[in-house]
Amino acid sequence: ELKVEQNPLFLSMQEGKNYTIYCNYSTTSDRLYWYRQDPGKSLESLFVLLSNGAVKQEGRLMASLDTKARLSTLHITAAVHDLSATYFCAGNTNAGKSTFGDGTTLTVKP
Amino acid sequence: GAGVSQTPSNKVTEKGKYVELRCDPISGHTALYWYRQSLGQGPEFLIYFQGTGAADDSGLPNDRFFAVRPEGSVSTLKIQRTERGDSAVYLCASSLLGQYNEQFFGPGTRLTVL
């Protein structure tokens, strides 16, 4: 059974700084997803990663996947307040079922 | 175009009552998923439909939970004899099956069982 672990669970950072969120998963996963969730809102899809070495970037966020290490990272560059949210990674072992981590709550302070 | 919609947005019920939660997926999406999210946790998979049939219902916690998708579009999650532990946000997502299988989530239904 796939298990997904994120760290850190809470992250407070200053505007302009860089940081990385880590997502480890326990068994082979066909896809690795990253989502953003604002308080009281639903999940917004950020990235879908398929293959080893995949890297995707959108604005100040960059996601990567290392299938050999069973590790995905979400790197934040020059953080701004608007990035404050909870970020989830999820593995997907067949076409349907996704297993989520517990989320990383990011707070960006001026 | 329209995204995934869910009704009601909030549902308050008493312990022991029956509730139905509705999900309208994105038009043309063949796959539909139900998840449950408790405060401070990630979504937990409940059930997944391909078309009209439940392809994987391994996440349904017990036989009080049941879901249908009779025409391959709208889905209803049904919970019998609700318990306080059922209180959570129930999220629905839909996707076009394929290499990426990107899931688009609805706003959720917040269920509170008193």
Image (spheres, coloured by chain):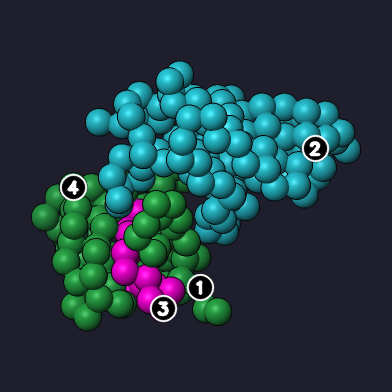
- What residue is shown with label 3? B27
- What residue is shown with label 2? A79
Q: Is residue A39 above or below residue A4?
A: below
Q: Amino acid at mark 4?
A: Ser
Q: Amino acid at mark 1?
A: Gly
Q: Are marks 1 and 2 in contact (CB under 8 Å)?
A: no
Q: Quadrant of residue B101?
A: bottom left
Specify the subunit that label 2 lies on: A
Q: Position of residue B87 (x, y in %)?
A: 35, 54
Q: Secondary structure at mark 1?
A: loop
Residue B61: image tag: none
Q: Nearer the viewer, residue B61 or B56?
A: B56
Q: Position of residue B50 (x, y in %)?
A: 24, 64
Q: Quadrant of residue B96?
A: bottom left
Are there few (<14), some (14-19), or many (20+) residues within 10 Å of tag 1?
Answer: some
Q: Amino acid at mark 3?
A: Ser
Residue drawn 70% across and 47% down?
A58
Q: Amino acid at mark 2?
A: Ala
Specify the subunit that label 1 lies on: B
Specify the subunit that label 3 lies on: B
**Chain letter, colour cyan:** A
- What residue is shown with label 4? B58
Q: CA distance from mark 1 to mark 3?
A: 8 Å
